[in-house]
Image (cartoon, rainbow, N blue to C red):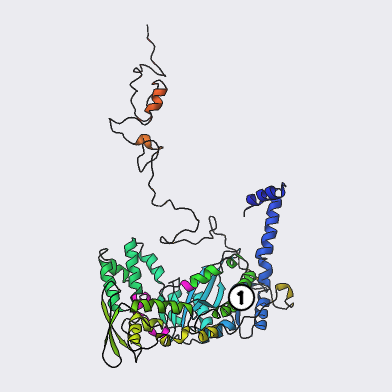
Amino acid sequence: MNVWELKKLIKDELDMYVGRSTVHRARAKILKEIIGDVHAEFKRLYDYRDILLQTNPGTTCVVKVEDQGEGKLVFNSFYVCFYAMKKGWSEGCRRIIGIDGCFLKGICKGQLLIAVSKDGNNQMFPIAWAIVEVENSFTWTWFLKCVTHDLELQDGRDLTIMYDMQKGLLKAVSEVLPESEHRWCARHILANWSKDWRGLERRNNFWRCARASCVAELNFHLDSLNMLGNGICESLLRYNKETWCRAYFNCDRKCDIIDNNMCETFNAWILAARHKTIITMLEEIRVKMMERIGKLREFADTWICDISPIAMKVYQDNMAQSMRCTIKWNGEYGYEVEDTSLRVVLKHCVNMQAQTCTCRSWMLKGIPCAHAIAAMHFKNLDPINYISHWYHKSTYLKAYSTFIQPVSNMQMWPTSTNPPIEPPPIKKMPGRPKKKRKREETEHPNSGKLSRRGMEMTCSNCGGYRHNKRIFPKKARPADSTPANASYIQRCGGRGRARGTGTPTTSAPAAAGRGRGTARKRN
């Protein structure tokens, strides 16, 4: 709320007139109480680190500063990873981590770097977060090294990293976790690729290619896409298909996600906190995480079985699809399953002993696919018993078995001898500061108003398109057309010219001189 809106609100609600300077001071005082005092919070950042380590043993908290001489310390970066999140990820989450960065919107600008995973119900599981000044290869390398040390990832073997190709991130991931599987967010690839290839049908074909779980299905969709433009497939395959297409993903992760929505969800979840000062923001994130752990443990009590709700939904969808499959059994462990539910008829091979299917969906998700379910029903087996342990309630509860402990507010902290930290200098950028991120063309606005994009301009004079009444006189009319303002000319007795016609009206004699009306005779 700006000053003028606040001034009007005081006038309407309290029937009082308050000067603009008074409203300015009142607004600044309110914001200071709500958002926090920038300098006071930076000075006690070391104290905040100490209180976190004291109340939550096993937590990692790092504060980096720059010594500018004469005892002046300027903030550089802050990292925190709670012990509850370390233990929860190692015991109850699949080996996939999404990393992303978002802008801070408060007085002191910067970037918030995050590492997020997935729990057994495919919900986000935040692991660690850090505040840095800028997003580059150096800050990403430092952040990834901290996460690697806390989670004991070594060289990244048996780990998948999902990211959005941010600045310096590819280099940092390759340096810190060289043996990890790389996945790129398909939504960001689509945003870049669709700048040259627009259209709904092309976008839908892209998603079919990204979601194809086997190479044969991918090639079929690529052939369909190739019919929508000359060189369109070559343009798409410039992006390494092994990083964004499900057909090439590692099957050991039991997670087939093709986008980085878990990080986007976390960024939106803490949006209000990102407007506040550093300790207030970090405390709001910690409190939200602390409350979330308790709520998700209570949520597990509402499950109707020992399998997570999202896994049961996928299982039920596959069950319905299995009704359209035909089975051929080899007499041992092998089955030929013909699937007629897709746009192309494919025959897949299921091996019950190895628990594999050539569609790869079963191995990618850890949930039996439609072909495997059809084979299990043929042998009177229960498909529920073949769902991966990552989706069981016992594994889910392990992810939330440790709690984040409460922390008292700043006034309750003991007085320490830690040196004060100064906030980083505020860099004044040209132009009006922007708080909203740039949206992609395929995103819908959240304003609640109908977009004017696609509307065609209409002229109120002639009813024509692609011009309005302002430029209407510049448009040439057919010779036999009636002027749009002919009725106005008749009401005025035929005086003057029809606007834009350039010829006198028929009801008035030709003008012989300047001025309005008929010309006077000269002697």
Q: Up-down: is 412 above or below 503? A: below
Where in the figure is residue 49, as x and y percent of width and height? 65, 78
Q: Magenta stretch: residue 61 in it?
A: no
Where in the figure is residue 179, as x and y percent of width and height? 41, 85
Where in the figure is residue 286, as x and y percent of width and height? 61, 75
Judge the density around disc 1: few (<14), some (14-19), many (≥20) Cα neighbours within 10 Å.
few
Name the kind of residue labelled 1 in the image.
Glu
Q: Give, as a single range, the part of the protein colored magenta.
A: 240-262
Q: Tell me the quarter of the picture where residue 33 sits.
A: bottom right
Q: Magenta stretch: residue 261 in it?
A: yes
Q: Up-down: is 367 above or below 233? A: below
Say which residue appears at 40% left-offset and 69% top-offset: 187
Q: Is residue 281 visible?
A: yes
* Element on which disc 1 rests: helix
Where in the figure is residue 83, as x and y percent of width and height? 59, 84
Q: Which residue is mark 1?
A: 291
Q: Residue furthest front?
A: 380
Closest to the observer, 428 or 72:
428
Q: Tell me the quarter of the picture where residue 223 sits.
A: bottom left
Q: Is 31 situated left or right of 246 in this image?
A: right
Q: Quadrant of the N terminus?
A: bottom right
Q: Up-down: is 455 above or below 63? A: above
Q: Is 283 situated left or right of 207 in this image?
A: right
